[in-house]
Image (cartoon, rainbow, N blue to C red):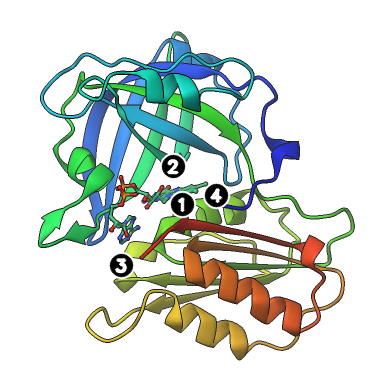
Amino acid sequence: MATYPRLMPSDPRMFTAEVVRSTRLSPSFQRVTIASAELAGFDWRGLDHWFRLFFPLGDTTDLQLPDVSGRLWWKSYLAIPDDKRPHCSNYTVAGYRRFDDHAELDIDVVLHWNDGRLGGVAGWASSARPGSPVGILDQGVLFDPPAGTSSYLLVADESGLPAVRGILRDLPPDAVGTAIIEVPAPEDAAPVQAPPGVRVCVLARNDSTDCVGACALQALAELDAPRDDAYAFVVGESSLATRGRRALCRAGLAKDRITFSGFWKA
Ligand SMILES: Cc1cc2nc3c(=O)[nH]c(=O)nc-3n(C[C@H](O)[C@H](O)[C@H](O)COP(=O)(O)OP(=O)(O)OC[C@H]3O[C@@H](n4cnc5c(N)ncnc54)[C@H](O)[C@@H]3O)c2cc1C
């Protein structure tokens, strides 16, 4: 994954919280809402703010979290014995609400199936019970348009939809550009709010024949060449991110005007 450490907190904080509810949003998304008093201290910056999500595997409610020292936590994570080490994956803040004595945070999890079963975080999300413990480690935002950006080009598959939705929500009202969002089913992207000058193009994939990212890359190829002062944000399945970036570079956009990140690997 490409990283943009400028916007990452230099001293990221780990927060503990509990699941309060888990709701099916659409054919491919489950929303898990977590809450705690500690979360009220989370410095939510909107846009595509993301975090590392930790939860215990199996039936246990014993959550053993790594020690965090500055940006270091991985060694401590690996040092946790196998049977106690929590699952860890990256997620976007889909919603954040602060109340008097606590805060709630929404996580929109793509329901992906492996061998006919809900895999990884999707399995956890769909069966998460109120009270289940989680840890989240703040990682900041990736979206980083240079000053003077004239237009925005956002490209994502479903794993990047929460990020693109957050960016569209927080762009200035006079922003212009295009968002290309590829999803398994059209209902997955409804509704996407965007400034009136940003064209939102939702493409539903035919899962039996299309490779993830193929529709988004085709739509990207059909756009006019970006202006020199445009900024692009391309995230999702690894080859969507790398091929999208390559296509934009070929179309003349400077590399430092493109943020790209492989969110998962098919
Ligand atoms: C900055 C960032 C923000 C992200 N935000 C979100 C978010 O808000 N919502 C979200 O759902 N994902 C998000 N992702 C992607 C998520 O981290 C990955 O999908 C991750 O692999 C899920 O972990 P897992 O344990 O379920 O699967 P893994 O254990 O990583 O993988 C297990 C299997 O599942 C497959 N797989 C993983 N993800 C998907 C998928 N999306 N579709 C189909 N197959 C998949 C893998 O190919 C593998 O075969 C984000 C990633 C990054 C880097």
User: Residue, x 81% and y 81% (percent of image)?
Assistant: 252
Q: Amino acid at mark 3?
A: Glu
Residues at marks 3 and 2, CA–CA distance in whole angstroms:
21 Å
Residue at screen point 67% across, 34% down: 8
State whether residue 168 is above or below residue 71: below
Q: Which residue is mark 3?
A: 187
- For residue 52, above or below residue 15: below
**Mark 1: which secondary structure?**
helix
Mark 1 C-beta to ligand 1 under 8 Å: yes
> Image point 58% across, 33% down: which residue?
139
The answer to whether the residues at label 2 and label 1 have Cβ atoms under 8 Å apart is yes
Disc 3 crowd rating (10 Å Cα; few below 14, some 14-19, many 20+) is: some
Judging depth in this view, the residue of 101 and 154 nearest the camera is 154
Does label 2 point to a residue whose CB lies under 8 Å from ligand 1? yes
Quarter of the image for residue 61 reads top left
Query: Which image quarter is the C terminus in?
Result: bottom left
Q: Position of residue 92 (x, y in %)?
A: 47, 43
Residue at numbered disc 1? 162
Please tell me which of labels 3 and 4 falls first in the chain. Answer: 4
Q: Nearer the viewer, residue 108 or 123?
A: 123
Does the CB distance between marks 3 and 4 fall below 8 Å?
A: no
Helix, strand or loop under label 4: helix
Label 4: which residue?
Answer: 166
Q: Secondary structure at mark 2?
A: strand
User: Closer to the N terminus: mark 4 or mark 2?
Assistant: 2
Image depth: mark 2 or mark 1 in front:
2
- Disc 4 versus disc 2: nearer the observer: 2
- Answer with mark 1 or mark 3, whichever residue precedes in sequence: 1
Q: Please indicate whether residue 195 sits to the left or right of residue 193 in the image.
A: right
Name the residue tied to disc 2: 91
Which amino acid does the dot numbered 4 rest on? Gly
